[in-house]
Image (cartoon, rainbow, N blue to C red):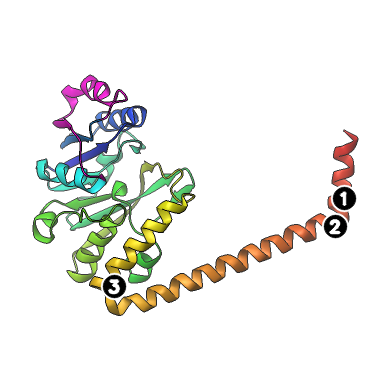
Amino acid sequence: MKLSIITINLNNAEGLRKTIVSVVSQTFTDYEFIVIDGGSTDGSVEVIKQYADRISYWVSEPDRGVFHAMNKGIMQAKGDYCQFLNSGDWLIEPNGLQYVFEQNPVEDIVYCDEQTENGPRIYADKLTYFIFFMESITHQAAFIKRVLFSTFGLYNEEHKIVSDWEFYLKTLFKAQCTYRHIPYFLVFFDDTGMSENPEFQKIHDAEREKVLKKEYPMMYDDYQELLMLKKEISIQNRSRLIQFVRQIQSSGFYQRIRRLSFRR
């Protein structure tokens, strides 16, 4: 079997339905579909049962978090590659998987591009430490050879957010695993609320620092310097934007527009 699609869910029945429909509508058929539900009480189990004949394996029981649920899926997987398509994310086109595997991927990690509520996300062909300092490849857009989890271990369940990022550092940079970018918008990734959530960002940054301090101490100072630079640039851009808005507001053109709007 070429692919194991693993979907985890907790009380997101409508998002789960979107995900399932996008999977079972694929023209590509050389896959198994695994759904790991965390003991939902919102009707998610009923959605799963509706499509049970198209799902290879499913379970609904409490788990210890996102990465524990993903690991449970990996333990059931039999495909050459694993793809983690969380509930609420979906494959954009019915021939999406067909297109990807027509490219005959053989690399350890293969990744595509994605659409989000905040716009398209296009990844680089060449991966560098700098890229992974600033961001990561989401697991929705990636295909990871299942054997990597046997070789390098499952996702670290101590983390709430960055375990997939940590796995990429371990496999791509430490172990020099092969990778390939397929420039194609494969998935829609539901990222609403994450970047605006201060608690999410706080945990995210703390977990990243912990990983770098422990596993990559020589990179840690560079990481901190880049974060400071990013913050300074953000502040400068914000200041320039405020200055630009004030200039517009004080201009004669702006005043004329205001008078016209008041007349209406």
Does the magenta segment cover residue 44? yes
Q: Name the quarter where the C terminus is drawn.
A: top right
Residue 85, image x and y in percent? 28, 41
Q: Is residue 142 toward the left or the right of residue 150 in the image?
A: right
The residue type indicated by label 3 comes to: Lys
Q: Earlier in the sequence, mark 3 or mark 1?
A: 3
Q: Which residue is mark 3?
A: 213
Magenta part of the chain? 40-65
Q: CA distance from mark 1 to mark 2?
A: 7 Å
Mark nearer the viewer, 3 or 1: 3
The one of 42 and 28 positioned closer to us in this rendering: 42
Asked whether the viewer can see residue 58, the reply is: yes
Q: Secondary structure at mark 2?
A: loop
Q: Is residue 123 toward the left or the right of residue 155 in the image?
A: right
Q: At x 25% / y 38%, what residue is drawn?
A: 8
**14 vs 240: above or below:** above
The one of 73 and 81 positioned closer to us in this rendering: 73
How many residues crowd around disc 2 within 10 Å: few (fewer than 14), some, or many (20 or more)? few
Disc 1 vs disc 2: Cβ atoms closer than 8 Å?
Answer: yes
Q: Which mark is residue 243?
A: none
Disc 3 vs disc 1: Cβ atoms closer than 8 Å?
Answer: no
The residue type indicated by label 2 comes to: Ser
Which of the 4 image quadrants contains residue 156? bottom left
Asked whether the viewer can see residue 126, the reply is: no
Q: Secondary structure at mark 3?
A: helix
Residue 50, image x and y in percent? 24, 19
Q: Which residue is mark 1?
A: 255
Q: Which residue is mark 2?
A: 251
The one of 215 and 256 positioned closer to us in this rendering: 215
Q: Secondary structure at mark 1?
A: helix
**60 vs 69: above or below:** above
Residue 80, image x and y in percent? 12, 48
